[in-house]
Image: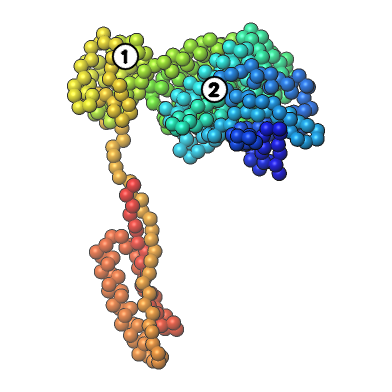
Amino acid sequence: MTISTANHLWSLDDVLGQGATASVYKARNKKTGELVAVKVFNLVSYNRPYEVQLREFEVLQKLNHVNIVKLFAVEEMHMNPKQKVLVMEFCSGGSLLNLLEEPENAFGLPESEFLIVLQCVVQGMNHLRENGVVHRDIKPGNIMRQVGEDGCSVYKLTDFGAARELEDDEKFVSIYGTEEYLHPDMYERAVLKKPQQKAYGVSVDLWSIGVTFYHAATGSLPFIPYGGPRRNKKIMYKITTEKPEGAIAGVQKVEDGPIEWSYRLPHCCQLSEGLKTQLVPVLASILEANQEKCWGFVQFFAATTDILHCITVHIFSLQQATAHSIYIHFHNTVSILFEDVQAQTGIELAAQQYLFLGHPLILEPSMKVVNLPLTTPDRPIILISRRPEKLVGHPYKERTVIINVFFCVIYQFQIKKINKKKTVSRMNRLKDEMEAVARELQNNNNMIERYCIVFSCECFCVQLMFLCRKSFQI
């Protein structure tokens, strides 16, 4: 079924997303053919107070930023009764949640992509705060991805149905959001249905940002009770409210078992130790249930901007066979770099010596970091220790996958006049010959695991069957 407004047309089959109060469809401009996204509200939305219905229109009209999905127009559908729809920017790359569901991102995004997410979300949130807007439903599904012609991603905040204008010192009492990303105070009232009249400030967005960043970095949620957040809601609340200071994750692996707290990002995620060191204090400070202890947006923006303004120096420790990313400010001196290298590798300053592109790299402690050669993961500075160092990286080893392969050789006798006695005699001789060949093959080739010979006098055929091991190098 096709639906239209005065300027746009879409099919009900082209669904981009669905929520509690609206559905989003891929549409085209009737004149230009330009792709857009249209948000169509359902009956649940129209049952809300009129001022709440208007809130999303009003919020989007005052926002204009590259990291926020743009509102083009508000139009009416050619239906009776006429319904208003939002015509918005179409993002070709889907959502951040779609990206995290890709198999290659099962353990989180690559470092370069995560930094783009960090930068885009921080800049988008900064624009919201400058305009006095609180989002109240930040999650990977509400962060859209636009892929440019150069293949680079731009992430944009979307779905402002729960948003409202709120200054830093103001509070609100209404409940919005998605369970796994809700601030514990809001979770208590919205999910556990406990009667309480707490007022919430803008910091509730920071909790949602923290859960979202952890999800993007690791591929999983930070707080997981046994059975999952949706099935074990009381333990979910217990984990988030009893989290020790400095912890960034808590998992209950056994029913009624203890909570295992984590104070660092998992080893399996794709971020370097250098970035993990910078990111963990931020996560620990915004994943804080006590609103008095939680960072405010000023501290959050200062800390994340600090990370984004760092220079990344790529170091490869030769004897240890390990790659390192050192995050450091361009105005710092090389003496700070030496300390960071020692912290990550354990190689003391006196033992550090460096090469770059095959030549000795002489580094003076007073030298500015900005004067270092430009490095990449493929073109790092080589660190050589003057002392013996233990191998840390995994040695290269070709993986061999063994696949069992079955095949058989069949000899079918073609005879015009059946002489069963002679035929059986010939078949027996052939069987003996084939068995001798098979035995020799097995003795001389360790790929043949076993064989057997079967012959049938009824159909006048002999089968020689092999079960072999086929090796593939990966």
Picture coordinates of residue 400, whole percent (x, y): 33, 49
Q: Residue at x 53, y 30 (%)?
A: 145
Picture coordinates of residue 283, whole percent (x, y): 50, 19
Q: Residue at x 62, y 32 (%)?
A: 37
Picture coordinates of residue 327, whole percent (x, y): 37, 18
Structure colour scheme: rainbow
Quadrant of res 236: top right
Picture coordinates of residue 376, whole percent (x, y): 32, 26
Disc 2 is placed on an element classified as loop
Quadrant of res 163: top right
Q: Can residue 382 be spotted in the picture? A: yes
Disc 1 is placed on an element classified as helix
Amino acid of disc 2: Asn
Q: Can residue 253 be spotted in the picture? A: no
**Does residue 306 sit above or below 142 in this rendering?**
above
Q: Residue furthest front?
A: 31
**Does residue 195 sit above or below 251 in this rendering?**
above
Task: State if disc 1 and disc 2 touch (CB < 8 Å).
Answer: no
Residue topped by disc 2: 67
In front here: 459 or 119? 119
Q: In the rendered view of the protein, which quadrant contains the N terminus?
A: top right
**Does residue 469 sit above or below 462 in this rendering?**
above
In front here: 398 or 72? 72
Q: What is the crowding at mark 2: few (fewer than 14 residues within 10 Å), some, or many (at least 20)?
A: many
Q: Nearer the viewer, mark 2 or mark 1?
A: 2
Amino acid of disc 1: Val
Residue topped by disc 1: 370
Q: Residue at x 61, y 32 (%)?
A: 36
In front here: 318 or 140? 140
